Image (spheres, rainbow, N blue to C red):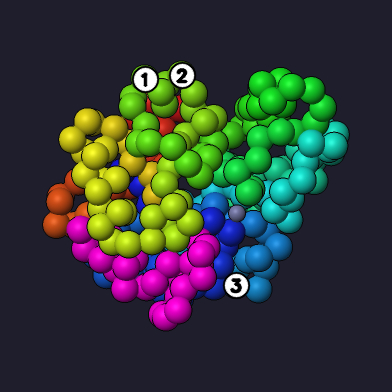
Amino acid sequence: MSLTYDDGLDSHLDLAIPALESRGLRGTFYLTLENVRERVAEWQRAAARGHELANHTVTHPCDIDGNDWRSYARSQIDPMNRAIDIWEGISASHDFAYPCDVTDLGPGSANRQLRRFEAVLRSQHIVSARTSEGPPNPPEWVKRYPFRLQALAAGFDAATLQQLTSYIDRARASNRWAILVFHDIVPAHPAVDELLASVHDGVLDAIVAMKIRCCPVGEVMKDFGS
Ligand SMILES: [Zn+2]
């Protein structure tokens, strides 16, 4: 399974990463360049300790159906990839998460837009793209649709420890890849897109107790030959 964190938020550095590391776990952090500029050195150190830095665009645009795909690639994807390459000290393949879960890049039908988006991502050395909904991923699904990785969004679609661990349990029982998505992690009074730190801690404890393999998205994709 994989633990993923979107948008490059301060609570990921301040709460999530310490919680992961105290349990020997590593996460995938889909960074939005404009959110992480002030704490670049800390993100760089997190990468050096084994966390994955991944691409979530430069400004997190949610309204892209009128966009020209070339300028989207040039302005939103390429600069984030380059920044990650510099911070990680290597030039490698990248993983991506769709901002706002939208895949309707440019004109045309939904299918055409998604295929266009995939072609743009492939042209930018991206090997997988994660959505924010759907059941755990069967191996055949990952091989066939690496640009449609399914995931459960904590807070939005599962706010309790029981809901989150039952998704992981379901994946384990059926030999599927569970991916959890976290946004802001807060000590108290979570909004709909936030998750209580105590629930986040509980999920990590459950993963350790279940003794299931938990690693960054990029490592799982390598197992699939990407
Ligand atoms: Zn996002």
**Which dot, 3 or 1, sits closer to the camera?**
1
Asked if the residue under mark 2 is in contact with the one under mark 3, i.e. CB atoms within 8 Å, the reply is no
Residue 1 position, x and y percent, is 31, 43
Asked if the residue under mark 1 is in contact with the one under mark 2, i.e. CB atoms within 8 Å, the reply is yes
Q: CA distance from mark 3 to mark 2?
A: 37 Å
| Quadrant in the picture for residue 204 | bottom left
Q: As shown in the figure, which amino acid type bears the numbered disc 3?
A: Arg
Ligand 1 sits in quadrant: bottom right
Category of crowding for the residue at label 1, using alpha-carbon neighbours closer than 10 angstroms: few (below 14), some (14–19), many (at least 20): few
Category of crowding for the residue at label 3, using alpha-carbon neighbours closer than 10 angstroms: few (below 14), some (14–19), many (at least 20): few
**Residue that mark 1 sits on:** 140
Q: As shown in the figure, which amino acid type bears the numbered disc 2?
A: Arg
Depth check: give the residue in front, 81 or 15. 15
Per the rendering, the mark at residue 144 is: 2
N-terminal of the pair, mark 3 or mark 1, is 3
Per the rendering, the mark at residue 185 is: none
Q: CA distance from mark 3 to mark 1?
A: 38 Å
Please state if 60 lies on the left or on the right of 224 as rendered: right
Which residue appears at 71% of the width and 33% of the height? 104
Q: Is residue 189 magenta?
A: yes
Position above or below: 101 against 157: above
**Residue that mark 3 sits on:** 39
| Quadrant in the picture for residue 176 | top left
Q: As shown in the figure, which amino acid type bears the numbered disc 1?
A: Glu
Residue 45 position, x and y percent, is 48, 66
Position above or below: 204 against 63: below
Mark 2: which secondary structure? helix
Residue 185 position, x and y percent, is 45, 70
* Range shown magenta: 183-206
